[in-house]
């Protein structure tokens, strides 16, 4: 598929869906205790996640189908989320299971249920009736994760994703040079991967530390999952870094949340130390991007001149749209 868009295209006419039908990292797992309900945003949609008494996490549309009470104010009763207004009880599949004073409730409506998974120290919700692809596999139980707070950037998700595939800006913003020719692969319709090897040319504190850790030979595998999750593996030789960035469209632009991983170590506190160093290095690297991209008006026509960016834009065009976007 060929992307052809006039220069100066408005952000709401960018190629690809404005809200990809994909996985969204909505909260840290630690923020959802057993027996707790939490209201979250999933690409502009209000959703309630709750952890049942057995520890399972479920995701339901935020409002009770009876009279519309917000279910984030409800209470968890065993495996059910109970509406705060009339105490209708809903299971994780959105089925009404209990109503005070009523025996047969099988015909009563329930809220919509959304696919939900716990990965990377966080809660992920898929914004569609069924998951079109699984969350990425980033190492199973080999890592410990730390999920940070969200940061809002005033631009759509596509310029944020495109920034990671913009290799020219590695030189101008991040003080990196490429050792070799980058490669791009698309193993399936929901995955796009960029690989390259870079060296440090900057002289800042984080630059000097990266240079020392890597021997100035940094192998990077950057993968875009469904347009909303970006995983970054950095091989520094003696140290490996792993990052997941979640991009959620919000009215103000895009909410970005970072999850950083470290391998489980034999020494007490080793993983915590590695997490701290990784978060500092990644944050120092990405902070330069977030400040520059705030308020960006993405010029698609110019971007297509770059072959790597062109592959990203073609990938974005093929992503599935949020099923409710046409009715919004």
Image (spheres, rainbow, N blue to C red):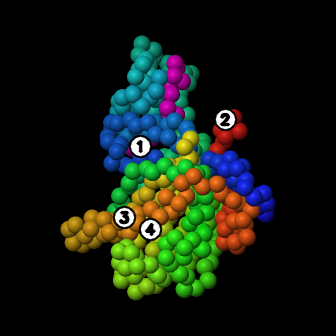
In the image, which is nearer the foreground, mark 3 or mark 1? 3
Q: Secondary structure at mark 1?
A: strand
Along the viewing direction, whichever of 301 and 270 lies nearer the viewer: 301
Structural crowding at the residue carrying mark 1, measured as other residues with C-alpha within 10 Å and reported as few (<14), some (14–19) or many (≥20):
many
**Residue appearing at x 39%, y 27% in the figure:** 74
Among numbered discs 2 and 4, the one appearing first in the sequence? 4
In the image, which is nearer the foreground, mark 2 or mark 4? 4
Residue annotated with mark 4: 285
Say if mark 2 contacts mark 4, CB within 8 Å. no
CA–CA distance between discs 3 and 2? 37 Å
**Residue appearing at x 69%, y 59% in the figure:** 299
Among numbered discs 3 and 2, the one appearing first in the sequence? 3
Among numbered discs 1 and 4, the one appearing first in the sequence? 1
Residue 279: assigned label: 3
Residue annotated with mark 2: 328
Structural crowding at the residue carrying mark 4, measured as other residues with C-alpha within 10 Å and reported as few (<14), some (14–19) or many (≥20):
some
CA–CA distance between discs 3 and 1? 27 Å
Q: Secondary structure at mark 3?
A: helix
Along the viewing direction, whichever of 213 and 153 lies nearer the viewer: 153
Say if mark 1 contacts mark 4, CB within 8 Å. no
């Amino acid at each position: 598929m060929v992307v052809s868009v006039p220069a100066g295209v408005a952000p709401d006419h960018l190629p690809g869906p404005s809200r990809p039908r994909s996985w969204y990292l909505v909260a840290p797992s630690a923020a959802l205790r057993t027996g707790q309900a939490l209201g979250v945003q999933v690409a502009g949609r209000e959703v309630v996640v709750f952890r049942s008494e057995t520890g399972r996490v479920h995701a339901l549309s935020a409002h009770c189908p009876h009279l519309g009470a917000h279910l984030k104010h409800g209470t968890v009763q065993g495996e059910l989320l109970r509406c705060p207004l009339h105490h209708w009880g809903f299971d994780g599949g959105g089925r009404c299971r209990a109503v005070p004073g009523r025996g047969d409730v099988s015909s009563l409506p329930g809220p919509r249920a959304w696919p939900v998974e716990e990965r990377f120290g966080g809660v992920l919700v898929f914004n569609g009736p069924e998951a079109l692809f699984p969350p990425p596999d980033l190492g199973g139980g080999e890592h410990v994760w730390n999920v940070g707070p969200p940061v809002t950037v005033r631009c759509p998700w596509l310029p944020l994703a495109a920034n990671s595939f913009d290799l020219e800006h590695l030189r101008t913003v991040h003080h990196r040079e490429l050792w070799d020719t980058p490669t791009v692969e698309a193993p399936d319709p929901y995955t796009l991967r960029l690989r390259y090897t870079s060296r440090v040319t900057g002289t800042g504190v984080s630059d000097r530390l990266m240079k020392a850790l890597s021997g100035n030979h940094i192998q990077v595998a950057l993968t875009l999952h469904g347009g909303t999750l970006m995983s970054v593996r950095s091989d520094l030789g003696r140290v490996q870094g792993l990052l997941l960035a979640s991009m959620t469209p919000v009215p103000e632009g895009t909410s970005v949340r970072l999850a950083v991983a470290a391998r489980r170590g034999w020494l007490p506190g080793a993983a915590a130390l590695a997490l701290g160093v990784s978060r500092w290095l990644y944050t120092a690297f990405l902070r330069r991007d977030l400040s520059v991209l705030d308020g960006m008006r993405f010029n698609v026509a110019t971007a297509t001149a770059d072959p790597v960016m062109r592959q990203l834009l073609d990938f974005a065009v093929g992503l599935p749209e949020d099923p409710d976007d046409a009715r919004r």
